[in-house]
Amino acid sequence: MPIFEFHCKKCGHQFETITRASEDGSGLECPECGEPKPEKLLSIFSASGTGSPASGGGGCGPSHGGGFS
Ligand SMILES: [Zn+2]
């Protein structure tokens, strides 16, 4: 489930929400001031992904099994 980050143009409040249908923020409103249609920011998946080694080795297949006879 994608989590989107929104930014209120009125009060500057920044919040995250899980959206399904209205990803453009047209059905949302700022939880702080109630301003409709907050500005959509980049997904936090691509925004805050610095310094986190996701690949810890071993993708597919057995590692060092040695049973290839
Ligand atoms: Zn606001």
Image (cartoon, rainbow, N blue to C red):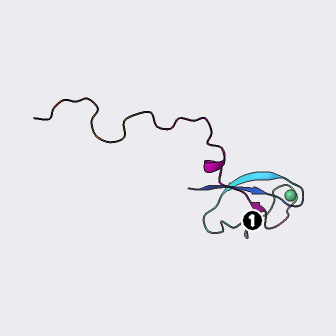
Residue 8 in the image: x percent, y percent? 83, 58
Tag 1 secondary structure: loop
Q: Residue at x 65, y 65 (%)?
A: 23
Q: Classify 10 Å Cα crowding around label 1: few (below 14), some (14-19), many (20 and above).
A: some
36 relative position to 4: left or right? right
Q: Residue at x 63, y 39 (%)?
A: 50
Quadrant, the C terminus? top left
Q: Residue at x 81, y 56 (%)?
A: 31
Q: Residue at x 65, y 44 (%)?
A: 48
Residue 20 in the image: x percent, y percent? 60, 64
35 relative position to 46: left or right? right
**Label 1 sits on residue:** 28
Q: Quadrant of residue 24?
A: bottom right
Q: Residue furthest left?
A: 69
Q: Is the residue 53 above or below the residue 34 in the image?
A: above
Quadrant, the N terminus? bottom right
**Ligand 1 rendered quadrant:** bottom right
Q: Nearer the viewer, residue 65 or 11?
A: 65
Residue 57: in magenta span: no
Residue 39 in the image: x percent, y percent? 77, 62
Q: Is the residue 66 above or below the residue 54 in the image?
A: above
Q: Is the residue 36 above or below the residue 57 in the image?
A: below
Q: Nearer the viewer, residue 35 or 50?
A: 50
User: In the image, which residues are magenta?
Assistant: 34-56
Residue 52: in magenta span: yes
Number of marks drawn: 1
Q: Residue type at mark 1?
A: Leu
Would you say the magenta stretch is mainly helix, strand or loop?
A: loop
